[in-house]
Image: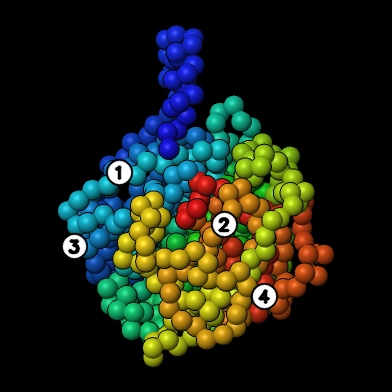
Amino acid sequence: MARGGSAVAVLSFLLGLPLLSVLVAGEDPYRFFTWNVSYGDIYPLGVKQQGILINGQFPGPQIEAVTNDNLVVNVFNKLNEPFLLSWSGIQQRRNSFEDGVAGTTCPIPPGANFTYILQAKDQIGTYFYFPSLAFHKAAGGFGGIRVLSRPRIPVPFPPPAADYTVLIGDWYKTNHTDLRYMLDSGKALGFPDGLLINGRGWNGYTFTVQPGMTYRFRITNVGLATSLNIRFQGHTIKLVEVEGSHTMQTAYSSLDVHLGQSYSVLLTADQPGFDYSIVVSTRFTTKIISTTAVLHYANSAGKAPGPLPGGPTTQIDWSLNQARSIRWNLTASGPRPNPQGSYHYGQVPTTRTIRLANSAATINGKQRYAVNSVSHVNADTPLKIADYYKIAGVFSVGTISDSPTYGGAYLRTSVMGADYRGYVEIVFENSENEVQSWHIDGYAFWVVGMNGGKWSPASRQIYNLRDGVSRYTVQFTPMHGLQSTCPLTTWACGT
């Protein structure tokens, strides 16, 4: 579909070239990137591994952008297998072909290149990119995306002295091809060998601060399977943004960051001049492992005295209550995530309720996972192509139900239909004994409730319909349900 082409043509025909020149001059800026994806030796946990590098970097390069910028990323695949990048949190408005997941975008063959064209339309905040095929994420290929507000749009806190990206995650010493084979064979991934901060192990990365100055830290969990907690020795942190939404500025001593989630916090260097530890540790694991980075004061007299800060209680309720405490800043300027044009998401009537229950099951003798009893398998033909060209036999709409069936799990290419501009209530239910993360590509949704047990219509009585945070990835804990409302529009993946 042409992006406003017919409107420009009519106006220029009626009003002449001067107006057309003004329209062209007012086009949103473009930023160009050329990335070479290759294998290379990395040593994140002190042993040699085959990593996936972008322009020789692990993690990959940071993307810097401003609201409405167009991002043109030309990716050359120098691996020996197909490669695909996904842009977590970027709303692909009428642009789902660029989303970078199986079913919407064709993989880049070895020795070939593909140019992604994205726009951070009406977005600000903290996002990231990662490889979405063949378990490549276990070898690298991920990096941060930072979308700043336009200069004339006020931000609800003073400009920080510096803006740091903090990519945290679990890590395995095993090659990604062997890990992939394990999963394909129906085996469990196992416990990670360690944790990384910006691709480095224990004390391997340093953030330098000036005394008395305030800094922004953009924290993202880019790992594979583990929820994490982050804390800054001797300092409190103030949460200011979650995945594109300014939040009420609440102070925390530590923060749980689940898989795929992103947070922005402010830290003021208001302590005596030492080197302090930034501690990241696993959550809800029988064995707790940690790693550290260094918060280095420019006037440091050496390592800060005292023990490393301990993590929060291992109980689920602590994490759940922290998540509930995160609220949207209703007075801050920013983009409206609701395409119906209103911040008042609680006043828009929902048109449909979808309940999604995850489960673990053995299918054909292998450990698999399912949603509403369907364990998804990718079709040989990308779904967007099959839909566009009306190719029969690739998928059928409605192959996954709107509610849990609680029956036996089975394999299928599952596709759920949706109405354009429908406003949907989505309920996630987790009956497993581990934390799950849910991400909806191309959308931001409001988290309106979290609670234990199974959802019922009576659960709506405790919804937060005023200042629930809008985000793109949310966790839900064992035996808990989560409710969100989500506007459905044609720019999202699969619609």
Q: Are marks 1 and 2 in contact (CB under 8 Å)?
A: no
Q: Are marks 2 and 4 in contact (CB under 8 Å)?
A: no
Which of the labelled discs sits on residue 80, or is there none?
3
Residue found 53% across the figure and 74% down from its top: 371
Q: Which residue is mark 1?
A: 115
Q: Report the residue that reaches farthest toward the bottom.
A: 365
- Write down the quadrant of residue 177 in the picture: bottom left
Instruction: Look at label 4 and name its amino acid.
Output: His
Q: Residues within 10 Å of mark 4 (few under 14, many from 20)?
A: many
Residue 342: horizontal and vertical position, in percent? 70, 41
Q: Earlier in the sequence, mark 2 or mark 4?
A: 2
Real-space Cα separation, disc 1 to disc 2, in angstroms: 29 Å
Real-space Cα separation, disc 1 to disc 3, in angstroms: 19 Å
Which of the labelled discs sits on residue 418, or is there none?
2
Q: Are marks 1 and 4 in contact (CB under 8 Å)?
A: no
For marks 1 and 3, give the one nearer the viewer: 1
Which of the labelled discs sits on residue 480, or is there none?
4
Judged from the image, the secondary structure of the residue bearing numbered disc 2 is loop
Q: Is residue 190 visible?
A: no
Instruction: Look at label 1 and name its amino acid.
Output: Thr
Q: Earlier in the sequence, mark 2 or mark 3?
A: 3
Q: Residues within 10 Å of mark 1 (few under 14, many from 20)?
A: some
Q: Are marks 1 and 3 in contact (CB under 8 Å)?
A: no
Task: From the viewer's perspective, tell me whether residue 352 is left or right of residue 151.
Answer: right
Residue 276: horizontal and vertical position, in percent? 52, 59
